[in-house]
Amino acid sequence: MTGTAAHDPHDPSGRRIVVPGGARLAFTFDEARVEACEGETIAAALLAAGRQVLRTTERRDEPRGLFCNMGVCFECLVEVDGHANLRACQTVVRAGMRVRTQRGFGYRDAAAELGE
Amino acid sequence: MIRRKVVIVGAGPAGMSAALVLAQAGVRPTVLDENPRVGGQIFRQPPPGSPAAAAAPKDASARHGAELLRRFEAARARIELLNEAHVWGVFPERRLAIGNQGGWQVVQPEHLVLATGAYEYTPPFPGWTLPGVMTPGGAQSLVKTWNVRPGKSVVVAGTGPFLLVVARQLHAAGVEVEAVVELARRSEFLRHAPRLLSAPGLLFEGGSYLRELKAAGIPVLWGHVVFAAGGAEGRLQHVSLAPCDAEGTPDRARARTLETDTLAIGYGFVPRVELAQLAGCELVFQDELGGWIPRTDENGEASVSGVWVAGDGGGVSGSVVAELEGELAGLSIAGRLGLLDAATLAREKEQRLARLAPLRRFRAALDAVYRVRPGLARLAEPDTLVCRCEELAASEVDPAIGFGGHDFRTLKVMTRLGMGPCQARMCWPAMMRRIADRTQKSCADVGPSRFRPPVRPTTVGDLVQLIPFEDQADAPAGAGR
């Protein structure tokens, strides 16, 4: 595998093809700090961080990850800053964003986060 | 309400080409696209400053895309572009409802060009919902646009020349490509060889991809199908595949298992027809073009006057055809608006039609080889989810088919199939084929799904803004129409 540096905080899983030199930022996923590159989607940043499971389903409580990666399938839904149902593949990361694994329809966790 | 001469939905190759032709002819077209940057799926642009943005185009198609993007950028002053604009509904008289753009709730063009593209077709099979299973295009975009490998290794499976493109790119990105699993049999190429020679350049490109894969030691398993994926702790670990017959039915006695953390699987593409359907355009079933498509004349005008369709959204034919169709629609609209004289219009149109003819012959031959086969409709086992959103297993939907749920509306009411956020985009193309297979009906008889606005995620705020202020106090029934 060329061009990777396993110790790089932006590439803990060794999945980045080129270790980027551009602007970087940090956000959290389920309270854990994740390093990302500016302009990338939540899905890309989480995959680079080795996090594949983005939500669990309402009925079967099964894990789901990225599937179509173009906004069509709605499998990659996550909670962002207390709002449920955001597509990780269509949402660009911002510094300080609080992203959480969406459980089922997500509203209960989201309500708790908003302190309601 | 905002009025415009021409609105183009989608800024992929078809939409960009239509816009360029119109700008050239002297009308300022409006282009709406849901992405932050133009290019569509095939020429998707990475964020500025990222490693992928710095990389040089790697093949002829990418170089061509870079040139199209450059021409579009050069004409930007003559094109009105709205990025991150989601068209969530089409209402009578070509009124488009738009989300995520302050001040642009409704726009009504004289001419509407739908250049909405296509998405990948993956029929259900056991294990297809495991994280690590994704579409080939999804995996491609991870490496091409986002600089991230989908996994350490990958099995690329399904049907179509696109699989070779994706396998090659994943290999170049440092992913271990275990195999390409192709439904079509190699012998089928010979039967269609004469028509495949209508586009020797494209044929040569496909051949060079095969040679590259061979040189890299990546096996291409022709006449094989992936029939199951398995794993533990929420991730893919292995896929099961077997040789199949001409129907696509796997011979499980000869099955084998490949260990991998990623499966990129897709059987061609499905045209995105939701906006055409909402606009009232007649849809026809054309299996080789991806299923239900709007009926159009040779210029791309649909059954509703003033609504035009170009590119894969009008039938999957690839980016070269999409560009020509975009130009054809743009020219025809310019002619309709009186911006081109009859002789110029006829000459320009003739040029495009002459270039389209051999490409369409080539495409028809490819479609005959890389076709969706009935065996795929039988891969789902009783416990396999056939509707990912509503989490419906085949064992919950098949009885409803037995009780007469043979069309979208009936089956939806009986089971909730297609009622989730994807609006049946993922489940219906496969369920339509499963119904056809189980009832001996044709897909044309089973029918398309029925889209309802909003066809994109829309906030209550966007809906409320559509209601005139004075009506809001006493018209809850009218909210959101």
Image (tube, rainbow, N blue to C red):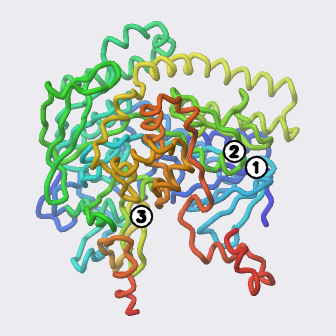
**Mark 2 element type:** strand
Are the residues at dot 1 and dot 2 in contact (C-beta closer than 8 Å)?
Answer: yes
Against B203, residue B464 (above or below) is below
Residue B79 at x, y = what percent? 69, 52
Looking at the image, residue B403 sits to the left or right of residue B277; the answer is left
Q: Are the numbered discs 3 and 2 placed on the same chain, yes or no? A: no
Q: Which mark is residue B6?
A: 1
User: Which residue is drawn at the image coordinates 31% and 69% (left, top)?
Assistant: A24
Q: Which mark is residue B480?
A: none
Residue B459 at x, y = what percent? 57, 73
Residue that badge 3 annotates: A87
Against B460, residue B23 (above or below) is above
- Between residue B223 and residue B149, name the one nearer to us: B223
Q: Chain of mark 1?
A: B
- Between residue B118 and residue B215, name the one nearer to us: B118
**Mark 3 element type:** strand
Q: Image quadrant for the N terminus of chain B? A: bottom right
User: Which residue is drawn at the image coordinates 58% and 58% (left, top)?
Assistant: B455
